Each structure stands twice: as structure tokens, then as C-alpha cells.
Amino acid sequence: MPIDAATALAAPPRTEEISWTRKDVQLYHLGVGAGVPATDVRELRYTLESRLQVLPSFATVAGARPPGVIRALSVPGVDVDLARVLHGGQTLTVHRPLPVQGTATTTSRVTAVYDKGTAAVLHLRTEAADADGPLWTDEAQVFVRGEGGWGGDRGPSVRAAAPAGEPALTVDRPVREDQALLYRLSGDDNPLHADPEFARRAGFDRPVLHGLCTYGLTLKTVVDHLLAGEATRVRGCAARFAGVAYPGETLRIRLWPEEPGRPDRPDRPEQPDGTAARAGAPQGGGTVRATVTALERDEAPVLADTVVEYV
């Protein structure tokens, strides 16, 4: 059987040392749509070294490693065709702000293998720490079509209820035609995102955008519009990849802030020079729920069950 759940779960953790520089961070930010308009002071915090902050979702590519959805396929007990693999979801917990450059030790292991009948789902958890302690914990959910049916644990099936009421904010984000080609330079060179022939073999009519690109783009939208551009306030982000996006499409992102003890509302927009950012920022922390759809395809779902936690 291509997936041996017992072997995958019993496999020892894999540890490696990774490092990154500010250029890696800048390239990742460009890959998730930063820098438009190029001279906007609010975009310079993602692109200009003298003002640089790190979007927490950079953790998913730090060290230019293949993403968890690919690394899971090299675990003992897992032998599947990449064309039948999809990224089912991603969770990220940030223990403290990520440095602009650094070195860390990562430890990864499969924590669950579920039998969904027509597919298998693997969870690969990765923990990263540097000399000052834990940095982040992330978990990729890997969906493998055609590999279920061995009678194993089906796993959790309860999904979050849809956000109630109208969103506090709706943002339309155009995706560049070459966005996937740019994003893959950060380490995810799965041919699904660049090779039309491979994409057709995987069941798509053309290459699709990386799910983690949409994930990072959505997190940036939350930071920019609801957290006054302060990426260091993010403490976690979880999302289920409900569908695919294609380069060149427009993503419609709907946001529902849920802060205990005060009415839901977006932050007061900052001034063009960025000086009023903190004045309008909510205090005490909370969560933001989000949905992402593809505007040109009758708002086909792209991200669902998306939650961003902040302080």
C-alpha cells in the first residue's frame, strides 16, 4: 500500500538547520503580492531593507525548503504520485516576531494519518527554534487522492460555521499573471504551479496558484487593513484550502473581526505616511475570520475556515 500509516507515524522526527536573509524575506513578500504600488510607504515595510518587517507566513518557506505538503511525501511509509497530492490546509502559530535574517533548527514529524475513504490525509507538524527559543509551529494537511480505504481513523470532520452577518471589510486583490512563477522562487517548485502538462495530469486545465501564496496574500490583507500594517501583532493563522486560484484572477477577501468586548469594525485607516497606524489599532487582541473566493469564476471558494489571531 502506498501509504503505511503505522510506519509514517512511527518515523523519527527529522531535524535540520535552516537560515534566511533579508533578501529571502523580500522575495517572499513580492511573491505574495507586496510592492504594489511600489512607492507606497505602506508597501515599503515589505520591500525596503531599512523598514523591513517579516510577514509571519514567511515561516512556511523559511530556509527555501519545500513546503510541508511536499516534505511529507519523503516520510517513511509514504510513496505516492505528486500529481495526486493537494494541500488541504495550513496552520501556523508564531511564538514571537520572526527576525529579518536568522538561523533556526526545525523538527518535523507526521502527527496524524486519516483514512477518508477516497483519499488519505497526512498532518506534518514542524517546530522551529533559534538560540533565543521557539519561533514558530506550523502544520500542513496533505490530501492524497485515491489513497484511502484501508479502514483507518477518519479523523475530525466538523467544520467551523460560516461567519455571521456582513463582513466588516471586503477587499479585491488582483493576482499577477506571473504570480506563481515569482512565488515558486521561494522554494516551492512543484510543477503543478508552472507546467501546463503536469497541471493537466493533475486534473486542472492550467497551472494553479500555490495555496500558500493565497494564504500569505490573505494574511497580508488582514495585517494591512485591520492591524494597521503591524505584522508583529499576528500570533497565528489557520486556513482550509477549499479550492484553487489561478494566476491572473481576482481574489475577493471578506473579513470579519471578532474582538471580545467591542463592536466589530476595521481599524481606522492609517495616513499615507504611515504615522497614524497605531492610533487606530485595536488593543487587547482578538481574531479575524476570512473567506477568499475567485471573482471571475462566480466566486468559487478558494480559502475557507480562515482565522487570524492577533495581539
Image: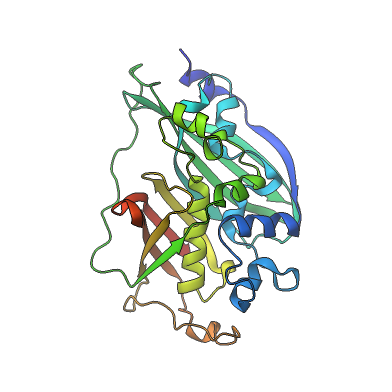
Judge whether residue 53 can be spotted in this image.
yes
- Residue 164, quarter of picture: bottom left
Dividing the picture into quadrants, the one containing residue 118 is top left
What residue do we see at 51% from left, 34% from top? 196
Q: How many marks?
A: 0
Residue located at (60% from left, 49% from top): 183
- 54 on left or right of 264: right
Eyeballing the image, is 140 above or below 283?
Answer: above
Q: Who's the residue at 53% across and 31% down the image?
A: 110
In the displayed structure, 305 sits above or below 153; it is below
Residue 258 horizontal/vertical position (percent): 35, 69
Nearer to us in this view, 250 or 79: 250
Q: Residue furthest top?
A: 1
Q: Is residue 45 left or right of residue 255?
A: right
Residue 217, position in %: x, y?
Answer: 51, 58
Asked if one can make out residue 310 in the rendered structure from this viewpoint, the answer is no
| Residue positioned most to the left | 165
Q: In the shown orientation, is residue 26 left or right of residue 259?
A: right
Rendered location of residue 292, percent (x, y): 37, 56
The colour mode here is rainbow
Image vertical order of residue 73 relative to residue 53, above or below: above
Measured as percent of width and height from the top left, residue 286 is found at: 42, 68
* Placement of the N terminus among the 4 image quadrants: top left
Residue at 67% across / 56% down in the picture?
27
In the displayed structure, 192 sits above or below 249; it is above
